[in-house]
Structures are given as C-alpha cells and as structure tokens.
Image (tube, grey):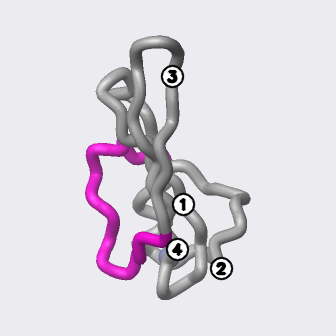
Amino acid sequence: MPCPDCLALEGANVSVSPHANLLLHSDAGINFGATASGHVEYYVCNACKTKWERIRARSEPEAEWRHTEKELE
Ligand SMILES: [Zn+2]
C-alpha cells in the first residue's frame, strides 16, 4: 500500500516537489525528438517502497508523476 505522501502524488504535476521520504535513486537524459530534451528522475519511497519517475523537460510542462516498473535497487 502506498503511504499517504505517495497517494498525494498520484496525478500531481511534475512541478510538485518530491515528498520527504522520496529518495532520488538516479536520473537519465531523454530526448523528445530532434530539438527537445530533458531528463527523467527516478525515486523510491523510503516509507512504502513505491517507485516513481518524474520527467523534467521544458517541452513537457504538463507531465505528471508516474509509477515506474524500472528496477531501482
Ligand atoms: Zn510512499
């Protein structure tokens, strides 16, 4: 079960800051076509172990926090 802080992130815009129990695991560069780029951050919740990804890119202002299936160990 997600913790209350993770539940609060469901559907939240990427401009929302990670909550206190989210630990940054890693990040990677990504491309959105020829001219747009950004990066994706992977987080793991220290309380409930939910895994999240957050896309940070000027071309994706409407992106939301998403769960990720990526292995983050
Ligand atoms: Zn959590």
Q: Are marks 4 and 1 in contact (CB under 8 Å)?
A: yes
Query: Which of pointers 4 and 3 lies earlier in the amino acid sequence?
Result: 3
- Is label 4 within 8 A of ligand 1 (CB to nearest ligand atom)? no
Name the residue carrying label 2. Answer: 73
- Mark 4 to mark 3 CA distance (whole Å): 24 Å
Q: Which mark is residue 44?
A: 4
Q: Is residue 67 above or below residue 29?
A: below
Measured as percent of width and height from the top left, residue 41 is found at: 45, 55
Say what amino acid the circle numbered 3 marks: Phe
Q: Quadrant of residue 38?
A: top left
- Left or right: residue 3 compared with residue 37: right
Measured as percent of width and height from the top left, residue 66 is found at: 55, 49
Who's the residue at 41% across and 28% down the image? Answer: 37
Name the residue carrying label 1. Answer: 52
Query: Which of pointers 3 and 1 lies earlier in the amino acid sequence?
Result: 3
Query: Which of pointers 3 and 2 lies earlier in the amino acid sequence?
Result: 3
Name the residue carrying label 3. Answer: 32
Q: Quadrant of residue 51?
A: bottom right
Between marks 4 and 2 in the image, the one whose residue lies nearer the viewer: 2
Image quadrant holding the N terminus, namely: bottom right
Who's the residue at 53% across and 15% down the image? Answer: 33
Q: Secondary structure at mark 3?
A: loop
Who's the residue at 48% across and 65% down the image? Answer: 26
- Give the magenta-colored segment's residue range: 11-25
Say what amino acid the circle numbered 4 marks: Val
Query: In the image as oriented, which residue stretches furthest toward the top?
Result: 34
**Is 36 in front, or is 56?**
36
